[in-house]
Amino acid sequence: MSPEILLAAAPGALDKDTRALVLVGFLAFIVPILFICVLSGPERDRVNDFYTAGRRLPPVRGAFVLAGVYLSAATVLGTTGSVAVFGYDGLFIALCTVLSLGVLLLLAHPLRERGGYTLGDTFALVAPGPAVRIAVAVVTLSICVPYLVVQLSGAGVTTAALLGLPGPGVEQAAIVMIGILVVCATVFGGMRGTIVIQMIKTVVLLGAAVAVTAVLLHRFHWSTDALINAAGQGSGRPAGHMRPGLRFAGSADPEGTLDFIGLVITIVLGVACLPHVAMQLSAAPDAPAARRTVRHTIAIVGAFCLATGLLGLGAAALVGAPAIMAADPGGNSTLLMLTGELAGGPSTHANGALLVVLVSSAVFLTTLAVVASITLAAAGAIAHDLYTHVLRRGRTSEGREVAAARWASAGVGALSIGLAVWVQGWNVLFLSALSLAVAASCLLPALVYSLFWTGYTRKGLLWTLYGGLGCAVGLQISGPVFSGTPLALFPDWHLDWFPLQTVVLVSMPAAFLLGRLGSAPGKRRAREVAEHGWA
């Protein structure tokens, strides 16, 4: 399976003239948005403007931005496919996306109250000094770079499919082109540019979801019962489609049950702690506003996930789960397959072409917006934590730090583009799973201890970050997602001694335990602050 595949099924099912119309409409929609993103960048080289857009984002607008950050391509595409193929389990995964915002709601107030630009600032209040900032930067980059590779790989497949020219060469060229565009938008736009593209992305994505859902329900005479029954028939498993256990080999398999529990924990706890999600909270004016932002975001994401559930059922009913699995075992192609079916396939009329343009633009914007946010978070870790506080020890001007952040954005972007071109055509599900596992295993325990336990020490924090990172990476490499199975990153290798696809059931408790053990014999926070000072 190619990563984050958006199949050519929707555009590829169209005739040549209609595909040309779709491409023209798509470009006319996307290009102005990118220019707006670049032009909306900060007028002055101030750190506060580049990282947080001046901390002036009100809750309602902030909710649309945070929803844009939250609704990644994996959520938009993968969840729709999971519902279509796995029924009940897919619907539960969609619910987990909303539940993860509940975790963010608990963290929003204390996170924003710390008033930092990066997670390194938050943890530096617990344990000042360069060692902590280096550790946080290492963890942040370990999350962001693999996630960027996955997003860029999917964007390359998307663009090649839209052009009607699928193939490795076209996909790799598309990755380079898209990567350069996003890097430019991040370098010149900063947080303000990212906010603009996230808001537009959320509005377009919600509009596309509403439009496709309306067409779908109209096809079934606005009867959800008829839709669910047809989905069961189209799934090939009418009796089991709306029962739990399809996602991981059935509930009778202990490993399958543990994997499903681990997947739920990874989504609920991992997504809420992704660095670019936490960084977005810093744009709120104050801590209460950050909390209100998350509350509004829950409503927006909840509405979209409801639409996602209906679209997944519609795909099972109209396209069929066997056809989806044959085209893309990961199910990430489901949304465009459904759109192509609703648009009329080869006999698509003008309204159908408009629907394809809307959905293609929404999915493409989703990828661009998420890539921009992740790039900014990675650049912040390099420029603010490593350059300003480790290399320069805080003795640098705002202009130099912003310049460093821009160069870091370009560097992270270039590295991610190169890696995405290199792994194009591979199944990089491993990289996506790794990013979420590291976030849940490292950042969640460290944030919980830092924000809610006064006895947390420097040693405990470092043990949590490095121990959680090592445990998550080691177990992920030793699992079936990395090697030994047909859908693994290296199917012909056999390093899979760890039986579970999801590792957080082991790595996250280990990180919590390491944090507790590391803090037990150490000095308390007040003594560390008195000795080292605040950084």
Image: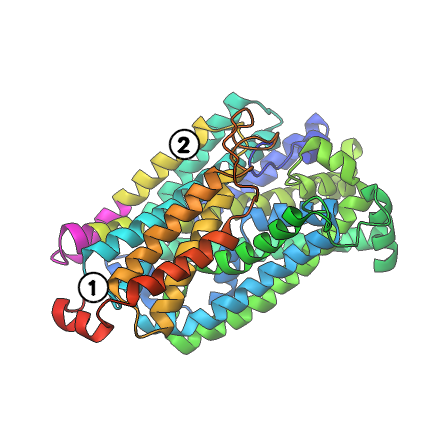
Q: Amino acid at mark 2?
A: Leu
- Mark toward the viewer: 2 or 1: 1
- Dot 2 crowding, Cα within 10 Å, few <14, some 14–19, many 20+: some
The Cα–Cα distance between marks 2 and 1, rounded to whole angstroms, is: 34 Å
Q: Is residue 407 left or right of residue 67?
A: left
Instruction: Name the residue type under label 1.
Output: Pro
> With 218 as the anchor, is 58 left or right in this view?
left
Find residue 400 and report its horizontal and vertical position in percent: 17, 51
Magenta span: 387-406
Q: Residue at x 63, y 41 (%)?
A: 332
Residue 249 in which image quadrant? top right
Q: Earlier in the sequence, mark 2 or mark 1?
A: 1
- Judged left or right of residue 11, residue 155 is left
Outermost residue, bottom side:
288
- Residue 210 showing in the rendered view: no
Q: Which residue, given by chain and number where applicable, does mark 2 sit on?
A: 419
What predominant SS class does the magenta segment belong to? helix
**Residue labelled with disc 1:** 128
